Image: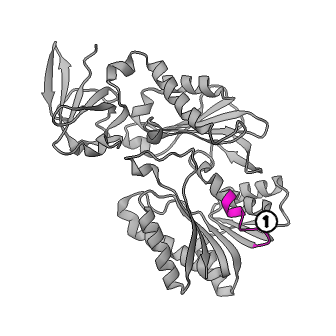
């Protein structure tokens, strides 16, 4: 049995990890024990000689075993938990361990998705693989592409085993890496992107809810497409038949295309990015809805003001903005941004109109989000009925004890 290093919590700091939280922060660690020269030694985290990327066992102050993680003193998140087993059990067959993890993640998705569907295959910590995101895209001709992100050292050190497991479980036509996120630098890792194995087409066409969608897996935002809104798009479309619809922050036009397919009278999809608008126009043509739907390149904040000044009205408005805050320090500023777009949208709706509004920022939590909606309604002199409170699809599981995995809010409302 190998003597793996042991990390001990300070008194009363272990409760969150005991409840399922997968991170140990540097200021929570009391000491580190490691085996050297045939004996155990103890030191502070700062003075220990444990190499970043090594497996460590995590213990309470009193010596209770909590699980195994990967240490990285470069990061504020010093240990990311990878399992509840002792380290020697994990390392006795690493290939089988990660194959079982990937197989488990794939199996739970197959309960809700068909072979021809696209979905998130691995959702990082929520699937017990910290820092790893894997999107499974199935093209209209049945080819499976994987887009992978290794966002933490805790998964980077198992890159070989994880890629092998993905190939065995998914038999992908191509694997593209999008580890080009700045968060890698906080982990002491360089950003990288490109094909793992043979190069394939970088722009692919998937089918979601019967809609053809072009996805740029190499240059699109994050992993190319936001799969988490699939079922929310379908829900939104139910309110759009015969209606005039504004689809704001459209990205690929997916909400608007679902509305057009459902029989909307008119759909305007808006994004500030010219590249995004070009892709939306391609998707409009691919789905033969040019007579119903068109895309505009504009700042949504400015456009909402323009519509209000001109007296423009809509029956349905969809707001799916990017995260306005990625830190707790920016919540106040984000609150103002979310409130402004929702307040103006409420003013642009016809009586009894439908507002479908979203936030994908974890830091802007549900209580804050619904409080913002209430105050936006008050300031716009409207009453709002919340018809549904929704979140991400079942391919984005929420891990008990890890609230960061519950990030997406999607409210279906009626404005009076």
The reply, left or right, for residue 68 in relation to residue 119 is left
User: 69 above or below 309?
Assistant: above
What residue sits 79% from the left and 36% below the top?
A: 141
User: 249 above or below 414?
Assistant: above
Q: Is residue 413 visible?
A: yes
What residue sits 36% from the left and 40% below the top?
A: 22
The percent position of residue 371, horizontal first and vertical second, equals 44, 72
Image-quadrant location for residue 50: top left
**Residue that numbered label 1 is attached to:** 293
Crowding at dot 1, Cα within 10 Å, few <14 / some 14-19 / many 20+, comes out as: many
- Is 379 or 269 nearer to us in this picture? 379
Q: Is residue 276 visible?
A: no
Residue 328 is one of the magenta-drawn residues: no
Residue 240 is one of the magenta-drawn residues: yes
The reply, left or right, for residue 386 in relation to residue 258 is left
The reply, left or right, for residue 325 in relation to residue 317 is left
The percent position of residue 48, horizontal first and vertical second, equals 19, 29
In the image, which residues are magenta? 234-243
What residue sits 65% from the left and 52% below the top?
A: 230
The percent position of residue 393, horizontal first and vertical second, equals 58, 50
- Is 109 or 48 nearer to us in this picture? 109
The percent position of residue 166, horizontal first and vertical second, equals 57, 27
The reply, left or right, for residue 196 in relation to residue 64 is right
């Amino acid at each position: 049995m190998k003597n793996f290093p042991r990390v001990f919590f300070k008194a009363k700091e272990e409760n969150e990890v005991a409840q399922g939280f997968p991170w140990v922060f540097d200021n929570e660690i009391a000491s580190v024990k490691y085996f050297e020269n045939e004996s155990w030694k103890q030191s502070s985290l700062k003075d220990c000689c444990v190499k970043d990327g090594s497996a460590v066992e995590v213990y309470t102050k009193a010596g209770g075993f909590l699980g195994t993680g990967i240490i990285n003193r470069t990061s504020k998140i010093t240990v990311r938990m990878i399992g509840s087993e002792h380290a020697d059990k994990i390392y006795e067959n690493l290939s089988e361990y990660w194959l079982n993890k990937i197989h488990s993640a794939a199996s739970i998705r197959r309960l809700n998705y068909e072979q021809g569907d696209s979905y998130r295959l691995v959702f990082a910590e929520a699937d017990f693989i910290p820092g790893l995101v894997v999107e499974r895209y199935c093209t209209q001709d049945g080819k499976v592409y994987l887009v992978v992100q290794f966002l933490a050292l805790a998964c980077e050190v198992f890159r070989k085993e994880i890629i092998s497991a993905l190939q065995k479980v998914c038999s992908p036509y191509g694997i593209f890496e999008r580890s080009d996120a700045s968060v890698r630098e906080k982990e002491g890792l360089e950003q990288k992107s490109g094909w793992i194995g043979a190069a394939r087409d970088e722009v692919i066409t998937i089918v979601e809810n019967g809609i053809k969608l072009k996805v740029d897996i190499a240059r699109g935002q994050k992993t190319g497409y936001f799969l988490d809104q699939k079922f929310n798009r379908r829900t939104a479309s139910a309110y759009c038949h015969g209606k005039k619809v504004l689809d704001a922050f459209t990205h690929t036009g997916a909400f608007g295309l679902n509305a057009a397919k459902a029989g909307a009278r008119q759909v305007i999809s808006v994004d500030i990015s010219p590249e995004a608008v070009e892709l939306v126009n391609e998707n409009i043509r691919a789905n033969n809805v040019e007579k119903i739907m068109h895309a505009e390149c504009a700042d949504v904040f400015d456009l909402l003001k323009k519509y209000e000044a001109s007296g423009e009205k809509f029956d349905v408005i969809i707001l799916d903005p990017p995260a306005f805050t990625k830190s707790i320090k920016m919540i106040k500023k984000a609150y103002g941004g979310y409130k402004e777009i929702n307040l103006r949208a409420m003013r642009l709706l016809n009586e009894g109109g439908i507002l479908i509004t979203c936030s994908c920022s974890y830091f802007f939590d549900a209580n804050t989000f619904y409080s913002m909606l209430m105050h936006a309604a008050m300031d716009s002199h409207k009453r709002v009925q919340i018809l549904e409170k929704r979140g991400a699809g079942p391919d984005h599981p929420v891990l008990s004890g890890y609230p960061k995995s519950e990030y997406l809010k999607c409210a279906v409302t009626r404005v009076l």
